[in-house]
Amino acid sequence: MSAYLGRDPLPPTDLIATATEERTRRREASLAAVKAGQITAEKADWDDIIWSNIVHFMRVLGGDRREPRHWHQDDKDLMARSVRATKQRMLIAYDNSAPGMTRQRIDAMTHVWYAIEFTLLYTKVHPIPVDRRGAAA
């Protein structure tokens, strides 16, 4: 059990689903904002790249062996900041009784942040699967 979360972290499949849903939601919102002239296409693309990395990071925790499998600490910090900011906006939406905003979504986003920010602690509970084909005898 994680001392930080007070319970075991979510399994990688749930982390992947949570990150993918958020990336899809953000992409749709960004495209609408670009069409409305509220943000630039470059900013929308940048946000999608960050969330693409977050989704891939969750897949790596689930055993995906596609590259990249490691990120520079600055990139991990950027991903963690984006997830934390998203979680904060989710809390505000929850407090304002926004439709579709549930405590479960907020908790799942907390686990995504935890997996990025505290990867070593997360993998103590959910070890990353080893590719046996390349493992030493």
Image (cartoon, grey):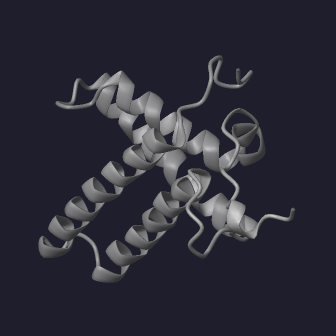
Indicate the position of residue 55 as horizontal and vertical percent values: 46, 58
The quarter in which the C terminus is drawn is bottom right
Quarter assignment of residue 64: bottom right
- In terms of depth relative to the viewer, which is nearer, 118 or 47? 118
Q: Nearer the viewer, residue 121 or 96?
A: 121
Q: Residue at x 68, y 69 (%)?
A: 71
Compared with residue 11, is residue 131 higher up or lower down, i.e. above or below? below
Q: Is residue 62 left or right of residue 100?
A: right
- Give residue 40's position: percent from left, percent from top: 29, 79
Based on the displayed image, in which of its 4 quarters is residue 20 positioned?
Answer: bottom left
Q: How many marks?
A: 0
Residue lying furthest top: 6
- Looking at the picture, does residue 125 appear above or below residue 20? above
Q: Residue furthest right?
A: 137
Q: Is residue 120 above or below residue 77?
A: above
The residue depicted at 27 percent of the width and 64 percent of the height is 27
Query: Is 93 on the left-hand or right-hand side of 110?
Result: left
Residue drawn at x 51%, y 59% as measured from the top left? 54
Instruction: Residue 101: give x, y in percent of width and height.
Output: 27, 30
Residue drawn 30% across the image and 33% down it: 93
Front residue of 11 and 105:
11
Which quadrant is home to the N terminus? top right
The reply, left or right, for residue 129 in relation to residue 83 is right
Residue 33 in the image: x percent, y percent? 19, 67
Residue 104 left/right relative to 41? right
Q: Give the farthest residue toward the bottom.
A: 42
